[in-house]
Amino acid sequence: MLALKLLFFISLFIIFYSYIGYGIVIWILVKIKNAVSGKKKLPANDFHPPVTLIIAAYNEADFIEQKIANSLQLNYPEDQLQLLFITDGSNDATPDIIKQYPRITLLHSDERRGKVAAMHRAMGFVNTPYVVFSDANTLLNKDSLINIVRHYQDPKVGGVAGEKKVIATTQDGTAGAGEGLYWKYESFLKQMDSDFYTVVGAAGELFSVKTDLYENPGATTLLDDFVISLRVCQKGYTVKYAADAFASETPSASLEDEQKRKVRIGAGGFQSMLMLLPLLNFFKYPRLSFQYVSHRVLRWAICPFLLPVILLLNIVLVIYEQGFIYQLILLLQVLFYAAAAGGWVLHKRNIKSKLLYVPYYFLFINVCLYLGFVRFVKGRQTVLWEKAARAK
């Protein structure tokens, strides 16, 4: 029984640490670092080196003109900015619309090989020292490029991660509320990670790397942005977080559409962990390994499988009358899952509930990780993924 108790509390601690404790720990570490060495000031934003903005677009005819207008309005010297759109595999009007803009370099091939293959092909046409990647269905704030490249004045910086903002819409339901809250917490963790040492993986909506540090992640890589940015860290550089450079997009139109994204990300997460096994070497990468395991590995690979373990162990310990504390924890677990179930019922009836969407979305994310793991093991997740619909 002692062994069961130890396993129960260790599992409980890991889950708490992964979702809440790490945020507290990294916040404290940043406070200590700032107290000892002083808070580092942002470099001046008068640094305007040549930059290439790459946008990979697949069948984005409904949105591409907004993306083009947004890109042309970015506050950056025109003679220092190259705009490169790649539309490989698109069979709608996307390439024809882009052709109407002479300032944009268009790359197009009828063959569809996936986003990562398109991005890598586009890199062969880059002749600037810095490259910025952005999704075709997001809009950037005007100063995003200036606020990204300013960080490259520090020679230790090899990449910069922008912020993802989820725009509230009139259609927002559980998907929008859950996705927005999730990214707010992720943004906080990314800022803390960056202040402590480095961001642990950039998001594809907006990120940048030094061109000579870019490494082809491989044609079958599902989370290219994550792998590219962490391989920059493997080379001894850091990835900084630019909260003042953000990509805005609407949330998924529904949880069904959000599930497509999360399952793909889940499968990509397990694939990425295999590709990035060297990052588990705490002796070679002490700070990076600590952040990578705490922020990513535990949440992706450990916690989803500990949730049912904790519930089952808790039931056994209550059955064998091991004490009031186990009864209390079991009650809290039952209430949490009941709230998640209630959130699911309200979602099906299209009723919003701020109180219930948090447990529901938490459980939803972990179920998607299970499904992603199954896809990864069976090799069923392709890079030619189906786009998720976005709310309007």
Image (cartoon, rainbow, N blue to C red):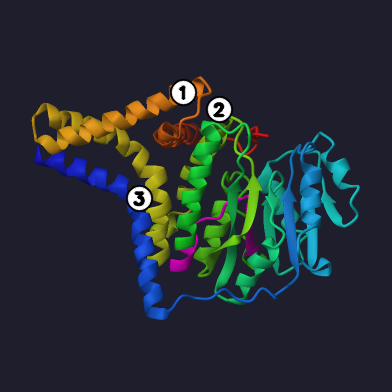
Tell me which amino acid carries mark 3: Ile
Q: Is residue 340 magenta?
A: no
Start and end of the magenta stretch? Answer: 193-209
Q: Is residue 322 visible?
A: yes
**Which of the 4 quarters of the picture holds residue 251?**
top right
Q: Is residue 199 magenta?
A: yes
User: Circle 1 — which element?
Assistant: helix
Mark 1 crowdedness (10 Å alpha carbons): few <14, some 14-19, many ≥20: some
Query: Is label 1 in contact with label 2 (beta carbons under 8 Å)?
Result: no
Which residue does the image show at 62% across and 31% down from the upper left? 171
Disc 3 target residue:
20
Which residue does the image show at 74% across and 58% down from the upper left? 53
Q: Looking at the image, is mark 3 or mark 2 nearer the viewer?
A: 3
Give the position of the C terminus as an image quadrant.
top right
Tell me which amino acid carries mark 1: Leu
Residue 190 in the image, given as x and y percentages of width and height: 49, 58
Going from the N terminus, do you reach mark 3 or mark 2 first? 3
Between 359 and 78, the residue placed more toward the observer is: 359
**Which of the 4 quarters of the picture holds residue 146?**
bottom right
- Give the side of residue 361 with respect to residue 350, left or right: left
Per the rendering, the mark at residue 296 is: none
Which residue does the image show at 85% across and 55% down from the upper left? 104
Residue 337 in the image, given as x and y percentages of width and height: 33, 29
Query: Is label 3 in contact with label 2 (beta carbons under 8 Å)?
Result: no
**Alpha-carbon span between mark 3 and mark 1:** 26 Å
Residue 340 in the image, given as x and y percentages of width and height: 38, 29
Per the rendering, the mark at residue 256 is: 2
Residue 16 in the image, given as x and y percentages of width and height: 30, 47
**Alpha-carbon span between mark 1 and mark 2:** 15 Å
**Alpha-carbon span between mark 3 and mark 2:** 27 Å
Disc 1 target residue:
346
Going from the N terminus, do you reach mark 1 or mark 2 first? 2
